[in-house]
Amino acid sequence: MPHDHSHPHNKPLSDVELRVKALESVLTEKKLIDPEAIDLIVETYETKIGPRNGARVVAKAWTDPAYKARLLSDATAAISELGFSGVQGEDMVVVENTEAVHNIVVCTLCSCYPWPTLGLPPVWYKAAPYRAKVVKDPRGVLEEFGVSLPDETEIRIWDSNAELRYLVLPKRPDGTDDMSEAQLAEIVTRDAMIGTDVLAAH
Amino acid sequence: MPTLTPDIVPGLIATGASARLDEDVAAKFSVGDAVEMKNINPVTHTRLPRYVRGKKGVVERDHGVFAFPDTGAHGLGHKAQHVYSVKFSFRELWGEDHAENMYLYIDMFDDYMKPAL
Amino acid sequence: MNSIHDLGGMDGLGPINPAKDEPCFKDDWERRMFGLFVSCFAGGHYNVDEFRHAIERMDPAHYLETSYYEHWLASLETLLTEKGVVTREELVARKKHIAMEDA
């Protein structure tokens, strides 16, 4: 089978590896799944869906005020204008970071995350320390990411516990007035679109 | 449902499966309402986390009608209802020693809330 | 349910340790697990609420010690056996067989 990568034979398969292989093998035998569909799903998320998509949304919002207005009023439709839609982005909300307000997104109960614009979540986003801490000590969390905000900045945490998915529109950094939309997209980080990063001036 | 084959994958990923329901259900709350989260402790599935139970907030936005996870997880149907973005101050959630310019927004179903007195 | 998954506001869980760069999947089993989740969901074997609830029913110590894709594996094993799509015996036997072939 094309997906069955060989592994070095000095190390036996772990318990988890064996359980996943057993599950896939039994389900394939029952014709309830198609391993080639799994190959394609994995390839799609490894090569086509990731934070570069969200960065394009952000760059367009920074350079096109009418688009930004649509993005903040009907995020799902505005994001799909750029071709990003679907699984775990069916109902989107975009929140804007400004001089006065800083937004941060979390899912305290599991790992909800806007897949079409950010891809699959990083390990830290899904792990217990971030989920537990950011709703109670967001400034402490930002410190762990090397970010410090003035005391006057209002902080808003968005716990995506239902089926709405949140994307932060980061504040456009100073010194980027001459940059094109494509150049701007290059400087937008994944963490800035979660809210755990602030983009540095250029 | 049919087995997922490669030809279906691109359309499935691009479309997804929204939990939004096209049902005409009256909203129990309006934007600006003061609300209190119910103190419930079901041993079944719920998306009402402990840290907001019994806390008071304000309805900021009505997201529309969605399927209710508390019933959906147990084969008890959609129980279509409105979901709202509700705003809480950190002082309400965590105490008076927290800064006053910090807020939590969380999406709450009609069944999780009652009017705040 | 008031289980370990309901983490908001808990203290003492350690540093966040964000990785500078990390791949989409760390390991091949994570790739297969992700695809299995999407495939079985599309096949109508569970809804997302059932899927999350099965994770919530994990042993709490195990929940904290394992990665998210292992939570997904536990959830799929639980749901697919509860619903009679596969049996525990089938999975255990197949696992033994694969381990033998691997040795």
Image: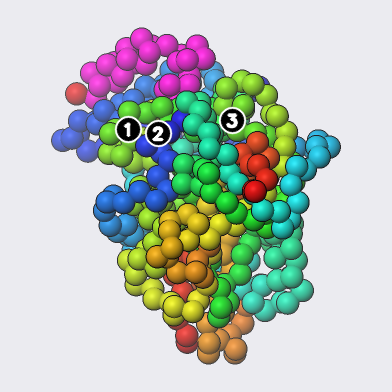
Question: Which is nearer the eye, B85 or A92?
Answer: B85
Provide the chain ID for the residue under circle 1.
Answer: C
**Callout 3, which amino acid?**
Asp
| Res B70 label | 3
Discs 2, 1: same chain? yes
2 vs 1, front mark: 2
The residue at 70%/65% (across/down) is A71
Chain assignment, label 2: C
Q: Is residue A145 above or below residue B115?
A: below
3D distance between C-alphas at marks 2 and 1: 7 Å
Q: Position of residue C74 (x, y in %)?
A: 39, 28
Amino acid at the residue labelled 2: Ser
Closer to us: C49 or C40 = C49
The range drawn in magenta is: C75-102
In terms of secondary structure, where does tag 2 sit? loop
- Within 10 Å of disc 1 (Cα), the crowding (few <14, some 14-19, many 20+) is few
Q: Quadrant of residue C64?
A: top left
Percent coordinates x, y for residue C2 in the rendering: 43, 33
Which residue in the protein does label 1 denote? Answer: C60
Secondary structure under tag 1 reads helix
**Left or right of residue C51, residue C26 in this image:** left
User: Which residue is the extreme one toward the front?
Assistant: B117
Q: Which residue carries the number 2 mark? A: C3
Task: Please name the predominant secondary structure of the magenta segment in the image.
Answer: helix
Q: Is residue A179 magenta?
A: no
Q: Is residue B93 visible?
A: yes
Q: Are marks 2 and 1 in contact (CB under 8 Å)?
A: yes
Question: For residue A74, which quarter of the picture?
Answer: bottom right
Asked if both marks, 3 and 2, belong to the same chain, the answer given is no
Q: Reply above or below: A153 against A80.
A: below
Q: Residue at x 43, y 41 (%)?
A: C6
> Which residue is outermost to the right?
B24
